[in-house]
Image (spheres, rainbow, N blue to C red):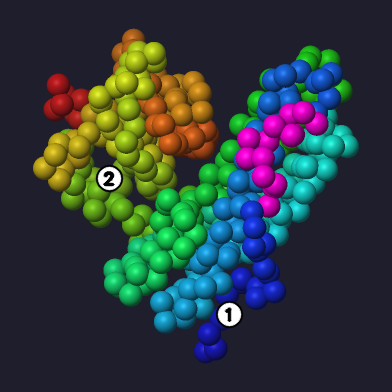
Amino acid sequence: PHSRRPVMSDTVTAPASAPGGDDPAGEEIFRALPESMSKGWRKAIQELVVTERIYVRELSTLMRGYIHVIPEQALSWEEKAVIFCNLDQLYELHFRFKAALERHVREDPAGISSLFQASEFKAPYAQYCSNHPRAVRMLSERLNNSFVRGVLLDCQSRMAQKLPLIEQLIVPVQRILKYPLLLQEQLKGCPEGHPAREPLQAALESMRLLASDINRMKRERELQAIMYGEVFITRTPTLRDRLVGFPGELEVLGSLVNEGEGFLMATDVTRVRASTSSRFLFLFSHALLSCKDRGDGKIAVKDVYLLTSAKICIIDKNTFSIEDPSTTGNDVHHYNHSRTDVGPWVFQMQDLGRSTGTRAEALEVMRRQTLARSS
């Protein structure tokens, strides 16, 4: 059979300089908005446009710094098609979207919600997000090759990127989950009775539904892959070997959706940033595991939060709270990560909590056994 050429078009050329001007804080956006709008509303629009500029710049970096320069000896066209999927389509979509946002700031800031047409985002993001686990698996396999590692490290250094490619690939997934939160902030700043409130509310519900649909399609794709023997959850075998204190099989938790390390945990929100309790978080389809490094290569389970019963709230950009009476009792657990926007984490947990529940009884038994062992 003929080899399939990747979806990345050779005609797509990312700009040589970062789009969005030389004002990274976006103060010119805030100044351009009419003073008749509340300060909170203007700040929310400013954050939307600034973060959109950053996102377009990140997509541009992936195009210019990786896709167009990695030699075929390191990654074949077929491998690039899997790893980078339809990034070129996302770049074109958001380059236009960013320009439209900037135009609305100048001409019709109260009408920005009209730009959030979920139908334009759905197909490209369903494709990218469903493919993301496969992309990570393939890239992880190729990183076992020292030549490939060297090529990718050289790309990362040349583009002055702090994060390796495998971590940059999650950025589009995080972005599409961020839009409901950005729209929510605009709605908070829009006064009651303002004619823009109803369109904002409609845009918010539309983007929430889109994010839920994408999460659902992603989980269905992962389940299909597991049924047909393709291993998508790349870290689970390693995690299974390192994790202690969780009785039974990890499969009861569902698919591994997200993971992070370096989260600080405290019951007092005013002390969480100074906490010395560092945790690993592993988000599965049915539960969030909070774990602690034992220092011997093993990770000990400290808390298991069922997503169906947990109450999860955003405190600020880097902090969220989680309250599950079966785990936390009367306490509220707070998690902070100075370099992580927790919004996508919270949205994923809330969305999974609404759609899961099929294994709640088994998980509850396991959780009680886990807590009894750690006490």
Residue for badge 1: 5
Report if residue 25 lies within the magenta region. Answer: yes
Report if residue 193 lies within the magenta region. Answer: no
Question: Where residue 97 sits: x, y (%)?
Answer: 74, 49
Identify the image quadrant of the C terminus. top left
Position above or below: 207 against 44: below
State left or right for residue 242 relative to residue 257: left
Residue at 59% in and 38% down: 178
Count neighbours of disc 1 (C-alpha within 10 A) and say few if under 14, some if 14 to 19, many if 20 or more.
few
Q: The magenta stretch spans which residues? A: 19-32
Separation of marks 1 and 2 at Cα, in angstroms = 37 Å
Residue at 39% in and 59% down: 232
Q: Which secondary structure, mark 2?
A: helix
Q: Nearer the viewer, residue 54 or 286?
A: 54
For residue 272, say whether it is visible: yes
State left or right for residue 339 relative to residue 12: left
Question: Where residue 203 sits: x, y (%)?
Answer: 74, 35
Position above or below: 350 against 282: above
Position above or below: 336 against 103: above
Residue for badge 2: 250
